Amino acid sequence: MAHTEHRTPPPVVDLPAGRLRGAVEDGLCVFRAVPYAAPPVGDLRWRPARPHPGWSGTREAGADGPSAPQMYREGGDPVLGGHGSPPFDEDCLTLNVWTPAADGAGRPVLVWIHGGGFVSGSGSLPGYGGASFARDGDLVFVAVNYRIGPLGYFSPDEDDEAANPWLSDQLAALHWVRDNIASFGGDPGNITVAGQSGGAVSTAALAGHPQAEGLIRRVILQSPPFGLDLPDPDTYRERTAVFRELAGARTAQELRDLPWPALIGATGGLFARTARWGYWPTPFLPVVDGVTLARHPVEALLHGSAAGVDVMIGWTREEANFGFALDEGYAGATREQVTDRIAHTFGAEAAPGVYAAYEAARPGARPADVLMDLITDELFRVPSVGLAEARADSEHPVWAFQFDLQAAAYDGRLGAAHCLELPFVFDNFEQWSPAPFLDGLNPAVRDGLARTMHRAWIAFVRTGDPNHPGMPQWPPYEARTRTTMRFDAAVTALDDLAGASRRLHEGRLRDGRLGEGRLRDGRRAE
């Protein structure tokens, strides 16, 4: 948390739910752990978010609240250094607000939905602090906590309203922003929602949701894994049965009676039971139930009111290196193993040719490199390009980007991995100091690229166009040019940057087959 200034009186706002007292941090007004929905505890576990009952007196909002319960490893991980730390508690439906002043200025609003594979993360992580956006862009920044893992992406009940608690939380937060953000100096009619990875899936789901119609003007989608095949309830029920078994609960009531640490403990077993070689592990997934979530989020951006939302979308050049490049079990992958994995997507007859195409695109590629490029394309790059293709030349264009700056850590093995763009977008490297993947970057290159990206995000939030005087011209993605901004040591707008991947997967793009697998026996089965 930033240094709190004691000479300036703390800001106070009066909301329908009650009075809030925040803090002044480095000249900004900050309100932390602001409740936007009732605590989802007791009978409200796995239920849709309910309105908060409010409070009497003045509620202190100067310190972060608990994050959503999740798996936690002491010492962190070798890439991010960790993505969520104690305290954890089911009473986690809160958000943090950064604003230049709690006044009536009507500033644009940026709502951040964190990612984390649907199982980790927190809106109060230092790296997701909104100080840089509030200060540099004169914006109001809101970071949201929501239910994740077994408490957010699982339901023991066969109930039309019980699926996808995570989505009900985010909708409640969005409505809270609409109803309350003017008190924090924000404009409820000018809301941009941004998210990364699983948070980008959430962002797309919100943009296309009937309960959010008219609330979102723009979205920023960073590394959305739109290639995930999202199950229907019948398909997902097989996985929930496995989780019930791992948790040692025979009935829905027994699950409700378990303390949350027991549910988180069973998550590790679900990772093991659902893992499949060559696939990104996703033990919990959004469920397309036709009620709470009507269609795959990537499709939601092509229909109805979401078709009028401005979109910025992008990916990193080597997304999959995040999960696979440092895993010795994949370093020794053989050509035969990878060809077999390719066959799951392209068929056995086409697999050798697809392998050769990937190999030719990366001189000196090992089988593990081919596998990582395939996963990057399947899960991230190609479906993102598919969205850009579908919306090209529409009245509401798409701005597309690829983040190419290679990490120096681990002798460059991570490349431009998943998540690496985050500290550049926020331009707050001091808040990412525990993250090993930033070690060894040239400070001049790092800071120059961060300044360019950060300002582009601010420009898009403020105007719907990411161009600003400090960068080359960034045209929208059009069918004729397919212009994509390449963020690297040199920032360059290139035509059809993802063309090789697009052409290799064009049959799947044309037929809409970007996530064909189904869950069988608790496993992904593409």
Image: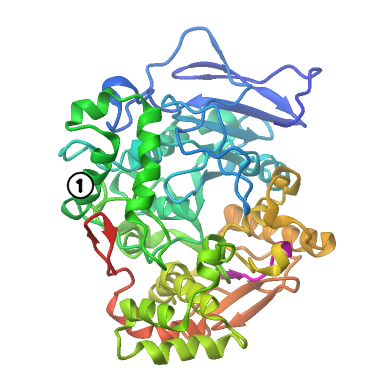
- Tell me: 226 left or right of 410: left
Residues in magenta? 401-409
Kind of residue sitting beneath label 1 = Val
Residue 522, placed above or below residue 109: below
Quarter of the N terminus within the rendering: top right
Quadrant of the drawing holding the C terminus: bottom left
**Is disc 1 placed on a helix, strand or loop?**
loop
**Does 56 sit left or right of 22 as displayed?**
left
Which residue is at the front of the view, 316 or 191? Answer: 316
Q: Residue at x 62, y 73 (%)?
A: 485
322, 500: nearer the viewer = 322
Q: In the picture provided, is 90 more to the left or to the right than 191? A: left
User: Measured from the top left, where is residue 163 in percent x and y?
Assistant: 25, 42
Q: Nearer the viewer, residue 250 or 202?
A: 250
Looking at the image, residue 405 lies above or below residue 190: below
Give the percent coordinates (x, y) of residue 502: 45, 82
Can residue 102 be seen in this snapshot? no
Q: Residue at x 59, y 40 (%)?
A: 141
Residue designated by label 1: 291
As drawn, 405 above or below 130: below
Residue 178 x %, y %: 45, 36
Tag 1: Cα neighbours inside 10 Å, few (<14), some, or many (≥20)? few
